Image: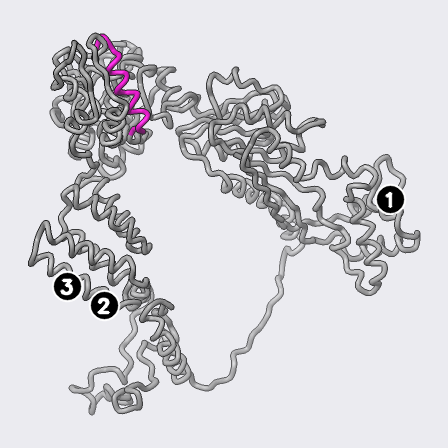
Amino acid sequence: MTVDRTAPSLFESPATEPLAARMRPRTLAEFIGQGHILGPGRLLRRAIEADQLSSLILYGPPGTGKTTLARVIANSTRARFTAINAVLSGVKEIREAVTAAQSSRRAGVKTILFVDEVHRFNKAQQDALLPWVENGTVVLIGATTENPFFEVNKALVSRSRVFRLLPLEEDDLRAVARQALADAERGYGRRAVEIDEEALSHLANVANGDARALLNALELAVETTLPVDGQVQITIAVAEESIQRRAVLYDKEGDAHFDTISAFIKSVRGSDPDAALYWLAKMVYAGEDPRFIFRRLLILASEDIGLADPRALSHTAAAAQAYDYVGLPEGRYHLAQATLYLATAPKSNSTMAFFDALAAVESEREEEVPVHLRDGSRDKDTLGHGAGYAYPHAYRDHWVAQQYLPESLQGKVFYAPSGNGFEASIAADVTRRREAQLAAMLEPEAAPEIMTVAPRFGQRERWLERAVSSRGQRLGEVRDDLFELAPPAPHHVVLDLRPGSGLITWEAVRRTPEGQVWALEPDAKAAVELESQAANLSELTRPILLRTDVLDLDADALGGVRFDEAYGRGWLAALPPLPDLQAAFSRLRAVMAPGGVVVLAEVDRRRAQRLHALVDLSDRPALAASVAAAEESIYSGTAVGAAERVGTAPESVVAAIESAGFSQVRLTPKVYYDQRRLPRSTIVDWFAVGGERASYADHLGRHLSAGELAAVKEAFMLQLADREVRWGTTYYFVRAT
């Protein structure tokens, strides 16, 4: 690694620095937490270990390891590493870094430029950096606590991979504290320091996922506690004094602000008063302006409650006014009262009808106001404006049926009353009046002529095309249903048990950009084809292809990689005959991560499309019943050769999975329909007899007379030959954890 000694360093940790700075990890082995992006097999870890980094942005709250991760990269890369801080640097420093990077590039050495707090750069500064990232002069690593999709130049984001770092778990924070207490070089390993488990748990809990806050509190506790008999004892009382107030991640102009108010409004809209109070308390605790909260509640009172409770708006307005009179801290009562009222009120979003009307105004051609609705005070006599208007108060119930919309929008409905609260009581009246208005506006006229025109070209060709394409559509549906049962997260490691053409493999690659995909393909020809397709991907995103099946899969040979999801489409049908499926599932369970999910999609051959259901034998009911019974016997478990034809029963598969140690197994059948054209030759093959393998006719012949079989064949030929039919294929899905 070449380090730029002229640039200000962000990574020096002399003994005078705070404990949190001294204890920054130097290698991936010392790094604690963020397993979703740095665990075995994850994309970022592989890129760091292979020194093949492309531009990336590390995004997460304070104390989660963004700058630390940059330090780890600086310690491991062979590239020239330069670090600047966006708060202290500007265009001048960027140009200096780029000039040095150009010199290194000419010498054959690439440059990694780390920009801490990259969101602090203004647009001009970010634009100054963009062309050098684009042409590869520098590889950018940006660190930010703000959402880069909002705070960083879109062009920079589009040229970088964004990794989100999450707040550390309490177990991770405990490990960070123990690491600091044991480290003799940078921590307190040379001092006699003991911390009670209760005190450690308190620090980890109140630190709220922030390793820096934890280490600062630990340092304060150690440095301010007098030793007794040479030993510093950190008790719960000392820990409470060292970290008295939980750090709430909240920035009034950042992600936390918008995310928290979003959670608050969604909780009120979702009628959850407990969640609404929690998010309200978090905002108030963090110092949010109560007037901002009241403004959002006033919007919600009309947007999400409206006429379901017309008092919601006035109640909220009154609470907001009361707050202005009272102020904090007592004004929190009014915030809580308004929140609880709206959270428990009946809901309706019928006021959204306004935006439907607005869309009509924007899209429809401009219409004049109907004559009877125009102002008649000025030109009633000359132009007839207002003539024909029926004054509602002159009629019973102060209402009369007449048309108020322009001519082209007659009959258009915008407002749909909900069935909640007060609005439910007016829904019937609105509907009744609307029906009367529609009746009043309609003039009696002859019904329009309805004509049906037959297609004029290519019907047969379209049938054939549809027959070809519909199977692809069905396979796509099976793939989508497979992933819907267990959607992988972007950072997950996925196993494809039977890639075949790659239908599942490539979808998994698309869905796990920060993870990894493995595939088991024992067939040499299929494996070569998959490798050829994978060559089009970058090395870090290619699936790892193993030319083996699950029976030969060695968990120890995977180097610690465990799979979050395993998908199999037609996997069981492709396995060699096994006396016991449990062996395959036991091998599979050994390579799954804790909580990992296995999802299988298999054709249920016991529920195959019944051919007799495709023909109409209603004129010979006895024969129809005999054919149905004969065909069902083909799939009977006691029929000759049934086990070979229909394979393992789904229930037996479930039993094998459970025996292998999977605890939650769910079996779901689903029928997919597609259009199939049945060539005459196919029907002929069905009714060929005496072949090496029993045909459809051979099975029917065991139950029907020769005359009956001939009649069935004739019906099939007449009704199905060269025709298109609706064909059902039954799959069963198994989901196991």
Left or right placement of residue 258 versus residue 346 in this view: left
Question: From where the camera sits, is residue 265 visible?
Answer: yes
Provide the residue designation for mark 3.
318
Provide the residue designation for mark 1.
698
| 548 shown above or below 120 | above
Where's the N terminus, which quadrant? top left
Give the percent coordinates (x, y) of residue 436: 39, 83
Q: Secondary structure at mark 1?
A: helix
- What residue is shown at x 16% (from left), y 21% (from top)? 221
Label 1 – label 2 distance at C-alpha: 77 Å
- What residue is shown at x 17% (from left), y 21% (from top)? 84
Give the percent coordinates (x, y) of residue 40: 42, 21
Q: In this rendering, which labeled residue sits more in front, label 1 or label 2?
A: 2
Residues rendered magenta in the picture: 168-186
Q: Secondary structure at mark 2?
A: helix
The main secondary structure of the magenta stretch is helix
Label 1: few (<14), some or many (≥20) within 10 Å?
some
Query: Which label sits on residue 311?
Result: 2
Label 3: few (<14), some or many (≥20) within 10 Å?
some
Mark 2 or mark 3: name the one nearer the start of the chain.
Answer: 2
Question: From where the camera sits, is residue 95 visible?
Answer: no
Res 504 quadrant in image: top right
Q: Are marks 1 and 2 in contact (CB under 8 Å)?
A: no
